[in-house]
Image (cartoon, rainbow, N blue to C red):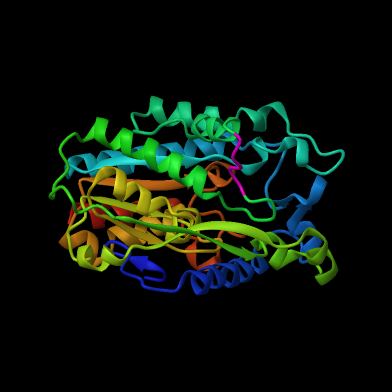
Amino acid sequence: MNNTAHHPFATRIARGLQYAALVGALALSCANAAAPANTSSMVLKGKDGWLFGGWGSLTKVNIAGIDTSVDLVSRVNQLLAAKNIKLQVLLLPDKVHFYTDKLPEGSTVSPEVKQRYTLILGKLQQAGVSTFDDYTVMQNVQKSGSEVFYKTDQHWTQEAADATAQATADRIKRDVPQLAGAAGTGTPLGAVTKERRYGDLAELFLTPEEKKAVGREIYVVRRQAESQSLLDDAPAPVHVTGHSMVQPYFGFPQKLSNVLDRPVSLNWKPGNIGPWVMLLEYVESPAFTQNKPQVLVWQMFEPNFEQNPNAAGLWDNASVMPNDTWLQRVTSAIQK
């Protein structure tokens, strides 16, 4: 799989190159998205240089789509439970919730969109799916004085990723108190360093003059610890599947492994791929067949949770399939 690690962080790509790959893939996926070709429609240029993705709605919520997604997730939860695998859905909140004051003049977030995260979370919990309120976790990070998203990027900061990893680990420990493996096999955290670069929204959708005006941002990242290579072959009782928010560049899987003190394996892809095909690729992979985890963390994103596997024109074309086809393939893969 592309940008996949089935051993803990086995993909040894330099972080700068990894981020460049992310931006390039995102550019290709956005070019195939349903939004107009004019790049000005792909980004909301907010106040004080803040940028937001322009492909989501600030006013409308697709309740029917959300209900379908909850039903599909619930079915996966049941399939995994039959194999003694605990599913945990990591629902990440939309950037706009934290910076509504930075949206463009005249832009407003409807009451329905303001309540969308809570709505989805409640429906997942009612369906018996293990999850937690990451919106509140990130609000607490912001209240402490730290940013939770980069100004000109659609991705979260290390502070937000770290806090979410801690909350994820706490939930895992509650759900599965005894993880397989030995103490001391978690990821050691490397030194923190800073990199100066353009955010992905600025890099992709602004003119050179506009990019110069908003400027580069300082990204806080962790380097790989020197001792990490010694742990690469340890089996991972926890697996994370998702998109670019959980890639190693932003620090989430390393922090999760460190807090759990166990290896964490990972598969992710950048771009407009969506959570459905990422889960499918993992459960159909030899890694899942040969080393089923005790816990599967499925990272999903609030703004596009309402988009099902069949969301043609919204996901990358190769990721789109009928909902029934997706469920049949997932069922077959898990039940092997």
In front: 90, or 232?
232
- For the question of whether residue 23 can be seen, the reply is yes
Residue 226, position in %: x, y?
A: 30, 66
Residue 230, position in %: x, y?
A: 20, 66
Which range of residues does the magenta coloring cover? 145-149
Q: From the viewer's perspective, is 317 left or right of 171?
A: right
Asked if 55 appears above or below 167 in the picture, the reply is: below
Residue 252, position in %: x, y?
A: 42, 51
Q: From the viewer's perspective, is 231 left or right of 316?
A: left
Reply yes or no: does residue 90 show up in magenta. no
In front: 274, or 103?
103
Asked if 87 appears above or below 132 in the picture, the reply is: below
Reply yes or no: does residue 148 show up in magenta. yes
At 61% from the left edge and 38% from the top edge, which residue is drawn? 62
Q: How many marks?
A: 0
Which SS type dominates the magenta stretch? loop
Residue 329, position in %: x, y?
A: 32, 57
Asked if 215 appears above or below 307 in the picture, the reply is: below
Q: Quadrant of residue 65?
A: top right
At 66% from the left edge and 33% from the top edge, which residue is drawn? 113
- For the question of whether residue 79 can be seen, the reply is no
